[in-house]
Structure formats: structure tokens, C-alpha cells
Amino acid sequence: MHILGIETSCDETAAAVVDDGNRLRSNVVASQLATHYRYGGVVPEIASREHLRAIVPVIRQALVEAGLTYRELDAVAVTQGPGLVGSLLVGLTFAKGLTFSLGIPLIAVNHIEGHIHAVFLEEKQRGGDIELPALALVVSGGHSHLFLVERSAEEEGLCRYRLLGKTRDDAAGEAFDKVAKLLGFGYPGGPLIDKLAPYGDPSKVTLPFSRMKGNPLDLSFSGLKTAVLRYVRASDMEEEISHRKRLFVEGCPAALEPILDVTPQGTRDLIAAFQAMVIEELMRRARKAAEGVDVRSLIVAGGVAANSGLRKAFAANPLPVYFPTLGLSTDNAAMIAAAAFPRLQQRLFAPDTIAAKPSLVLA
Ligand code: KG4
Ligand code: ZN
């Protein structure tokens, strides 16, 4: 079964073909990063327009790389939500038109479930299978959620998701992006902080743990971000920050040396301490969640799963831990096509009236 996946929930126009939920034939991602860069974040209006511009060539390329024609597709899977409404609408409307004209089913996929399925897809490609129940930590620019993933008792091949905890404020990726921005680095901040953190000593800067009442599996990053802001204000860093802003004005330099040149040791230490605290917050909540339930494996997915410090820290976990490869950690359509396969088997098709759901939850 050839499934074409389409993903347009934020600022990446993506299309991919996956066979039977376990064989990746093509995976094309057109990033809008260069367009949004100068605004320091994603501008929803611009994102929608860029999706409109990119969607046809991206889908065409995914088909060419898969060696298939439109007529050979068995189904189209598309992200229904969560995400930016204008962006979601481009993918959903295109997918509706395509399935209608080809006379094939349309399958709606939750973006967060997609991130989890990126890991299932790659494990199946390696010939393995992830043992369930699993704990899934989905950490990206838009979400930070902890789920219990179990096999569905009613629908064969499908999973059931129980939300155990989520962020009370910023998502983990959002925290990376905001801290990088306030330090004068470009957007997105996660990959850059990841690269710079090994050059600092986290023990040189003390940052606070999040403290919250209520669900002990909820996460929080805004206190940490505020602590970094206070540290910056107390440390007279204005001059070095404006120096960096000038370096980053046109885009993130490809080489690390010029970035290190404008990042004094104290700032490197702050970055290392910030990243260590984000990792500690994620590990702490995941450890706690694993105490209360019988889980066989741990899945870490979403853009922040690309973080090398996080990968190292989780690798020491007693449970088998699964991360997507870097290309399938950030937004892509392969994960959407893979998540749709069990739905195709169960004939769980989207009705013609399906609408984009910017706040779609996974439960
Ligand atoms: O999954 P994704 O592409 O989009 C959303 O669904 O939000 O995640 C993007 C987020 C951004 O916040 C970015 O800074 C973060 O993932 N990110 C990283 C790394 N690579 C991307 N954060 C930390 N370390 C990285 N290496
Ligand atoms: Zn995502």
C-alpha cells in the first residue's frame, strides 16, 4: 500500500511516500526557515503563502523520488492538527482535492501522533518492533507532552494514547528558541544551543528547577527562561549581545568559529547550564512517569529529540530508548504517512467534511 503523506502544520512543507507503514520510499521537506528568519520566528500569514507556493513541487518531487505516479497511490494522509490554521488548511485542502480526483481514501493524522510514528517507522525499517506499552516524550517547538502508548484493544494495529503530563507554559523547543533569541542568536535556537553547549561548563551557572503544584508529570520551562533573562540583565551583557545580533542578522553562519568568537566563556557556561536544566527537567518527568506505570520502552520524538545532549542523557536509561534519526525528528511527512497505515487497514477514512483543527489533542 503506497501512502502519500502531506504535512503543513507549521513552517515546513513536506511530502513523503511510505509503503505499508514500514518502508520509506521518499521524504521531501521544503523549509521556510530563510523566509521567517528575519522576523525571529514563524509568521503565520507568510507560512500559509509559502505552503501554497511549495506544495505542488514538493508533492511532485516526493512522487518522483518514490518512482510512483499519482495513479499508483492507495491513499493520502494529511496532518489535521494541531498547528497553524492557515498552514494546516493548505495541506488539508490539497489532500482533499487530490483524493477526490483520484478516488482514493483520505486519512487524517494528528501531528503529535505522527512524531511518535516516526520512531515506529524507523524501528520497523530496521526489522525490529517497539515493545508496548511505551512512554513517549514528544518535545518540539509547539509541544512538550508525556504519553503512555498502548495497543488499542478495539482496533487492531492502532495505538491508544494516555496523556500523563504536558508543559504548563512554554514547549521545550520554544524555550530553546526564546533563550537563544534573548542572547542575540538567530532562529531557531535549539540547534545552535546544542552546538555551543559542549563548549561551556554547566556547573559554573546555577539555574533553578521548575517548582509546581499539581500533576508531578507536568513540565515547565518559563521559570528557567526567566532565570536566564535575570542572569543576562545582572551580567551587563548588552554589548556582546548586540555584537552577536550583527553577526546573525542575515542568517546563522555555517561555521562554528565565528559564533564561538562572539560568545565569551561566561555565555558558553550559561548556555551549557540552560541546556543541562532542560534535559534534567525532561529526564526527571520521564523517570517519574515510568515509576507509576508498567512500560517496556521509552520513545523520545519531536524537534528537540535532535538534541545531542538529550540523546546522550537518555541513552543511559535502564529502559530501551528510541529516538528518530535527525531527519525524522523535526517536522516531516513520512511520520504522517506511517501513522496513517493502521487507519488505512481499519478503513478509518476522513469524511469529506473534515476540517483543520489547530488545537487538536491526542488522547
Ligand atoms: O518538531 P519541530 O520541527 O516542529 C514542531 O512541531 O514544533 O520542532 C522544532 C523545534 C524548534 O523549537 C527547534 O529549536 C527545536 O525543535 N530543535 C532543537 C534541536 N533541533 C531542533 N532543540 C534542541 N536541540 C536541537 N538539536
Ligand atoms: Zn512537530
Image: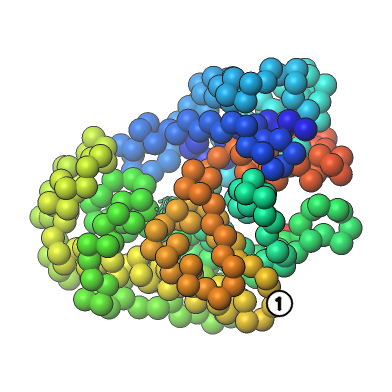
Which residue is pictured at 64% across the width and 67% down the height?
297
Residue under the point 55% across and 40% down: 332
Q: Which one is in front, 215 or 108?
A: 108
Where residue 335 appears, as percent x and y from the top left, is 62, 43
Is residue 88 visible in this depiction of the protein?
Answer: no
For residue 346, which quarter of the picture? top right
Residue 33: x %, y % from top left: 39, 36
Report whether residue 129 is seen. yes
Q: In terms of secondary structure, where does tag 1 sit? A: loop
Instruction: Tell me: residue 326, above or below residue 170.
Output: above
Expressed as whole percent of the image width and height from the top left, the position of residue 355 reads: 72, 37
Residue 68 is situated, as x and y percent measured from the top left of the image, at 67, 20
- Kindly identify which residue carries mark 1: 294
In this rendering, position of residue 32 left or right of residue 156:
left
User: Image point 84% across, 42% down: which residue?
Assistant: 345
Residue located 67% across and 35% down the image: 18
Going by the image, does 189 lie left or right of 69? left
